[in-house]
């Protein structure tokens, strides 16, 4: 019951992410006179369509929470290629980068199938990339990697941001926790994104951790 209550609280935060992408796509279509550029129009419409579908799926999950509780689970497990999902996410999130920012994906294998809830695992990766963009104190350089080790899928999202002080490495996954530094608190947020990511990974019987790089940090 505690897991489900935490899940519902976090979902209200997650609904904001596809709305933000939709807003950017639609605003770009209206602002920059793209009507004479069919390729750009098609790309923005494709992104808007993808995010509309994701938003619809997320809303349905919340509305159907009572049914999910009766079944005793909040996950819909399927076998899917996580690499294909990450490529799709990277395409969407590149639209949020400023000039010069990059998102690169380096899979160890072309296909990496796993059993999991593709919608929620997608939200975890979106969350980590979104944080890397929001909190970076310079032009974001984000690298995503995937590999398999002894039957375990390992995904990492690394950036060139300011990093996270060692004493907060566990606390950042707590609900409502935000780093007590001035530059972070200038970013709007509720301290729920990493809590949500941690919850979803726990429900998958997995682990999530952070390591500092020089510069930046890596979520694994």
Image (tube, rainbow, N blue to C red):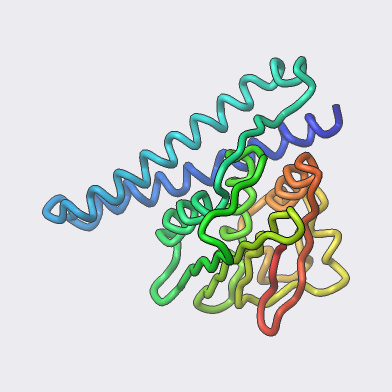
Instruction: Residue 140 in the image: state x and y as whole percent.
Output: 52, 73
Image quarter hosting the N terminus: top right
**Apparent side of residue 215 relative to residue 168 in the rendered image (left or right):** left
The image quadrant of residue 211 is: bottom right
Residue positioned 46% across, 72% down in the render: 102
Number of dots carrying numbers? 0
The residue furthest bottom is: 214
Q: Nearer the viewer, residue 69 or 118?
A: 118
The residue furthest front is: 150
Residue positioned 73% across, 61% down in the render: 149
Residue positioned 64% across, 49% down in the render: 124
Compared with 40, 107 (above or below) is: below
Q: Nearer the viewer, residue 6 or 69?
A: 69
**Apparent side of residue 168 relative to residue 101 in the rendered image (left or right):** right
Compared with 96, 38 (above or below) is: above
Instruction: Residue 208 in the image: state x and y as whole percent.
Output: 77, 56
The residue furthest left is: 36
**Apparent side of residue 185 relative to residue 129 in the rendered image (left or right):** right
Image quarter hosting the C terminus: bottom right
Compared with 197, 69 (above or below) is: above
Residue positioned 45% across, 73% down in the render: 101
Instruction: Residue 99 in the image: state x and y as whole percent.
Output: 39, 73
Instruction: Residue 144 in the image: state x and y as whole percent.
Output: 58, 66
């Amino acid at each position: 019951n505690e897991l489900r209550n935490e899940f519902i609280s976090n979902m209200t935060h997650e609904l904001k992410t596809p709305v933000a992408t939709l807003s950017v796509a639609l605003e770009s279509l209206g602002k920059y006179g793209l009507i004479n550029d069919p390729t750009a129009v098609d790309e923005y419409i494709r992104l808007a369509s993808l995010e509309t579908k994701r938003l619809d799926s997320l809303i349905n999950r919340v509305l159907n929470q009572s049914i999910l509780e009766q079944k005793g689970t909040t996950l819909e497990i399927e076998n899917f290629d996580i690499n294909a999902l990450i490529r799709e996410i990277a395409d969407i999130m590149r639209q949020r980068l400023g000039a010069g920012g990059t998102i690169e994906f380096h899979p160890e294998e072309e296909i990496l199938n796993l059993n999991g809830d593709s919608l929620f695992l997608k939200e975890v990766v979106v969350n980590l990339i979104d944080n890397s963009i929001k909190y970076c104190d310079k032009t974001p350089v984000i690298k995503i990697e995937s590999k398999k080790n002894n039957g375990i899928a390992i995904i990492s999202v690394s950036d060139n941001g300011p990093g996270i002080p060692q004493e907060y490495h566990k606390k950042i996954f707590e609900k409502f926790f935000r780093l007590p530094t001035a530059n972070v608190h200038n970013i709007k947020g509720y301290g729920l994104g990493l809590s949500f990511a941690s919850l979803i990974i726990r429900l998958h019987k997995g682990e999530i951790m952070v390591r500092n790089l020089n510069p930046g940090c890596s979520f694994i």
